Image: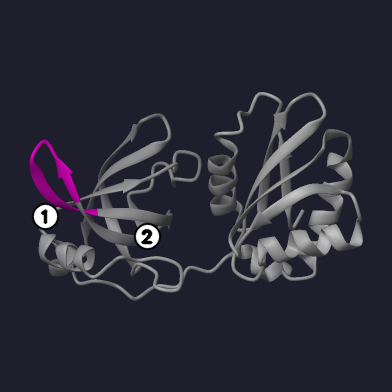
Amino acid sequence: PFGLCLFDPDWHQGVVGIVASRIKERLNRPVIAFAADGDNTLKGSARSVAGVHIRDALEAIAARHVGLLNKFGGHAMAAGLSLERARFDEFRAAFDHEVRRHLSAEDLRGTILSDGPLESADLGLDLARELRGAGPWGQGFPEPIFDGEFEVVSSRVVGETHMKLSLRAGGATQAVDAIAFNAVDYWPKGAKRVRLAYKLDVNWFRGLETAQLIVEYAEAG
């Protein structure tokens, strides 16, 4: 499906926003995750991608399918809604149909826009601090993302789903720390070299300040 609707009776209403966000990032398409609200009603949390104004999409569905949605509200990238549990499959089909009006199969592949590579000498605290101080970043003013190839010096799983890494850029003598959140499933296991899209940030740990790469995408180099 182009627009994905998910429901699990074990999900709590407090986590469906996180579920929708993570799956949206992985699959690059609008996602709505639902939790039960009593015996007969579902509450959903929606997250969208560029090209689909999610509140407007819900409004279009409500106009075409009168009574399908109990209520909804939100903005371009996130929204909330409720509907009758018995009409979940009907809504799922309507949502996919609406998303297909705005996205093509090519759009679902996803594109990462990079600000280019950094020299190995720039992968340090000075630039990381400058970038941290240049914010705040947000919608319409995104944090810079860089790309490059790195040697994997070491890697390990932390917190069950994250990858903690030590990487060395070409021509560098010292390694730089990196973290890839929720990356266990997609990390190129066994790769000695990787190509990354990443953010450069400052990490504080036990009173020590260091530069750290925040990995947004990885593939074997």
Q: Which residue is rendered at x = 39% and y = 69% of the image?
A: 142
Q: Is residue 123 visible?
A: no
* In the depicted structure, whether residue 193 falls above or below residue 52: above
Query: Which tag, 2 or 1, sits closer to the chain's start?
Result: 1
Q: Position of residue 86 (x, y in %)?
A: 88, 34
Q: Are marks 2 and 1 in contact (CB under 8 Å)?
A: no
Q: Quadrant of residue 48?
A: bottom right
**Under tag 1, what secondary structure?**
loop
What amino acid type is highlighted by mark number 2? Leu
Q: Which residue is mark 2?
A: 196
Residue 72 left/right relative to 118: right
* In the depicted structure, whether residue 154 falls above or below residue 116: above
Q: Which residue is mark 1?
A: 174
Q: Residues within 10 Å of mark 1 (few under 14, many from 20)?
A: few
Q: Position of residue 131 (x, y in %)?
A: 22, 67
Residue 217 left/right relative to 10: left
Q: Which residues are magenta?
A: 203-212
Q: Which residue is rendered at x = 75% and y = 25% of the image?
A: 38
Q: Quadrant of residue 162?
A: top left
